[in-house]
Amino acid sequence: MIDFSNIDKWSWKYDLFNRYLRFNHNKVYYKEYRVDNQDKVPPPGEPLFIIGNHQNGLTDALVLLYMYPDKRQPVFIARGDIFKKDFVAKLLHFLKILPSFRDRDGSRGDVRANSNIFNIAAEVLGRGNTLVMFPEASHQHGNYLGGFKKGFPRIALDAEAKHDFKLGVKILPVNIYYEDYYNFHSRVLATVGEAFTIESLKELYDTEPNSAYLKLNEMAREKLKEITLDEDPEFYPQYDTLRKILRRNRIRKRGGNPKDLCEMKTEDIQIVAELDQLKKTDNERFTKLMNDAAAYEKGVRKLKIRDWLVESKIPLVTLVLKSLLLLVTFPFYLFGLINNGLPFHAPNLLKKKIKDKQLHSSMNFAPAVLFTFPIMYLIIFIIAWIVSGKWWISLVYCVVAFWSLLIYNAYRKAFVKWRGSCRYRSLERKKNSLLLNIKEIKGRIMRKDLI
């Protein structure tokens, strides 16, 4: 195992690498990357332990890495099984990631090595730096909060104990909310909660450390839950469907903007709270609602249409105009496809081998940003230089090719929506019985208040 003791030392190489990744993450991969309550993040120099919900693989870590207005270099803690090979461990050290071993990750010796790793993590806090961890220890497959493991409270409390509980470690909960887990150029929101300190646990820690760990986990989970969309795992698909059906109209009714990420998340949390309340107070009505939601989602999937189409009015003239627009802009799409299609779709080969869909966005981002696009643009630059004989023409072409990526992606999405609209209109004209049924279910859901 390599030496991680200096992992929090500021590195100009890491800073340079991070600038490249930050730009691609915040400005290119996501159409909107937003940090709500950023002013609540304590300034550099204060010992800070950030905890977040974990639902989307590597992209969760990137969201928390790029949320600061300053140039701090936080240290992350990740599962230990990915550190087995030396060259991988060295790379992860460069990326400022510490290993944390679980019983299932390796031998008992690996798990015992956690004591040393946790000591290093505590020293990172002791030096007034920032530590980041996902206390659930594994990602969840949706918008719900799992149980917290002991690693997080142990590090935080042990760091305080080494300084007689005068260090002032601040625990900062941050929630990550995705508009879309998997697709390029969607939106993501990081909501910063209220930081809290843990000196009140000193007496309990001195007498019963394990009880103090459990108490801190309980406190931290409650703080994170306050800003998290936490759906009932038992009825997750139904909750998800009901949020999509109800959210837009509810936001509009109260005069809000249904496209604003913060408003979307706030409304989602409210819908989930009302569903949870309905489950407690009127189980019969709750069960009927869950059945309706399940039937609706099944029908939408079978018809191969999206929820936004159901009950929408799509005039023929609108479809004709959209068809003409797609036809006129096709050459721009083709230019984007020629220059970006190969590196854009190359990660799909990796995703086919990964069954866990929550890791797919990580495969979209990392290979594309680190390998496929840089290699493709290097090839484009060389070819353009050979053809034109001038390096500046090659550079201009590469810049144009890069921005054509966004046009290419926007065209793809517009085409999918146009195709769905055509299909929906055809089903409507034929008075498809399943479509009529799901329209009636959606109307029934939207007409009734949850509580």
Image (tube, rainbow, N blue to C red):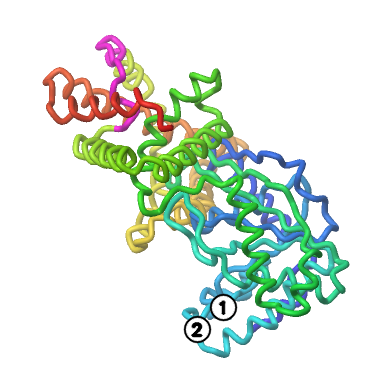
Point out the tag, 1 or 2, that comes first from the N-terminus: 1
SS under mark 2: loop
* Residue 134 in view of the camera: yes
Label 2 sits on residue: 106
Asked if the residues shown at circle 1 and circle 2 are in contact, with their CB atoms under 8 angstroms apart, the answer is: yes
Q: Quick check: 70 above or below 256?
A: below
Q: Residue furthest top?
A: 317
Indicate which disc residue 24 carries.
none
Depth order, front residue of 300/237 = 237
Q: Give the residue displayed 79% in from the left and 62% down from the top.
A: 169
The amino acid pointed to by label 1 is Phe
Residue 31 screen position, x and y as percent: 54, 36
Label 1 sits on residue: 101
Quarter in which the C terminus is drawn = top left
Residue 368 screen position, x and y as percent: 49, 52
Q: Give the residue displayed 24% in from the left and 25% down from the top.
A: 439
Q: Is residue 318 magenta?
A: yes
- The stretch of residues the image draws in magenta is 306-320
